[in-house]
Image (cartoon, rainbow, N blue to C red):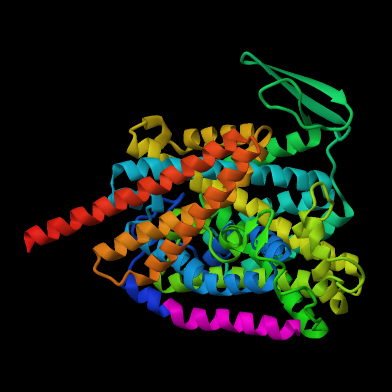
Amino acid sequence: MNSLVLAALSCGALYVGYLTYTRLIARLWDFQPNRPTPAVESPDGVDYVPAQHWTVLFGHHFASIAGVAPVVGPVLACALWGWLPTLLWVVIGAIFFGAVHDFSSLMASLRAGGRSIADLAEAHLGHRVRIVFGGFLWLTLILVVAVFARFGAMTLNNEPRVVIPTFGVIVVAVLVGIMMYRWRLPQWLATALGLLMLGGLIVAGFNLPIKLPWADYNVVFNVHMGYVGIDTAQGPASGGDWLNAGLVQNANVLAWTVILLAYAYCASITPVNLLLQPRDYLSTFVLYIGLLLGYVGLVLTRPAVEAPPIVGIATAQGHLWPMLFVVVACGAISGFHSLVASGTTAKQLARESDAPRIGYGAMVLEAALAVLAIIAVTAGLRWNSGPNPLTAVLQKDNAASPIVLFANGFAVLTEPIFRDPALGALVAITVLKTFIMTTLDSATRITRYIGEELFGEGLGITFLRNRFAATLIIVVLALYLAIGPWQSIWPVFGSANQLIAALALLVLTVILWRRGKPIIYTLIPFVFMLVTTVGALVFNGWSFVKGGKIGLAAISAALLVLAVLMVFDSLVAVLRERRRAESKG
């Protein structure tokens, strides 16, 4: 099949969905373009800060939700089950599930003064739900911070050419924020100056790679009866048990991890309009350019899709249902998006008229990135010169990764533009790695919000209402996970992320029901995501038991208990509301 036709049909469906379905969902939330937003009504100069223009907030929101997941998930799904079910889920899921989930989370938060989805759970489902759901979100987000700090550290260590642009963009972002909010320069001028500086940083980074001086050293952690000793030794890094002697870390990776978490701490407590808004806004232009180059290259090359549409229904990683819908994740729907929409975006929206573009439109654009990733690996890779190139990504300890495969396919699509495939691959990797930092700082800030609401306000722990203390605890725990057991916990994160989406949809459905609005548009996605996630947790849990991974099996069981508690408390809340209405009637 011609890849250009496939891409045109997919992107066309996404665009039509944006034009039509977004209006329907907006009506559910009594959308009023001129209604004052929480950022306008209650500005605090730190978190509640109205963005200067909707494109600035769109950049912040999109950079926070996108990351590398819309590439990694679809590529893995294509390798496991085939491109046809993967592409169908990306398009259908984004229009009717993911975008509805994101936009509704944003609107619900706007109606509640910018409160997070966890805080909304208490108002509509009870205090226990807030504690259980909020605690689960807080712990899950700390894992996100840890993993992205670790990924970022390994990237900086392995790709020294990205060090200057990675940290230089922080300074550029602060300057752009000052230009827009303090000096009141026109947005186009501040943007142009920022992009020129960003371009200069990329050129400088390619010509002046920066390496830390401890590449040949490892740091060995020994933990005995609460005593921690650190020794340095030359030699290759090796794995180890965090609870016993022998956890070995490359000194450079460890140093970069500490540096990135220190940055995340500062970013979380800095006024949002001075760093996160302009930083993510500028970073998004990198992805815009990458998407544009990819699709222009596709128009020029138009390679045939030679990969099999369906690889199989059952694999060692699980059946197509439920596992494909968990693996694709952010390409179609992601629980993390509801935390971004209700955690930071709702606090920065200047005009309600911009909510559909940001809440619904950003998910559609993310799906377009996922479509490009699918085309790149199923049509861009050379399928007629050897074995299936996607099988390499499924082999343990293989150098091929979803990002590398995407970069290689992207290089083929853009060969008429760059001429040199190596340059095209480098551009693709640079585009994706830009978003590791944006997810890191946004996740840290959102974790702080949820921690302040849960521990400071919900449990009355006074000092945790302080943003400095709340963020410090997050960063310390993330550091522990980043240099310790994060790899052990990560296999269940995909299911946990999709469970967040299901539970967020549950909260949104109850809110709409209490408002007397049609609930079918959130109820169907909730039921599907709940059943699918429970199925994935059962499959994973049984696999962990058979493999002797009792800790992971226990985490899977805990997530199942959380789902049951949330559904039970929701039914109790609905029945209680019904009896109250009947008694009044």
- Quarter in which the C terminus is drawn: bottom left
**Magenta run includes residue 206:** no
| Residue at 47% in and 60% down | 529
Q: Is residue 125 left or right of residue 339?
A: left
Q: Which residues are magenta?
A: 1-22
Q: Residue 172 location, x and y as percent?
A: 67, 56
Occupied quadrant, residue 508: bottom left
| Residue at 46% in and 63% down | 528
Q: Residue 420 location, x and y as percent?
A: 91, 70
Indicate whether 5 appears above or below 312: below
| Residue at 60% in and 68% down | 366
In terms of secondary structure, what is the magenta stretch mainly?
Answer: helix
Indicate whether 249 appears above or below 40: above
Indicate whether 139 appears above or below 335: above
Indicate whether 130 appears above or below 394: above
In front of the other: 56 or 480: 480
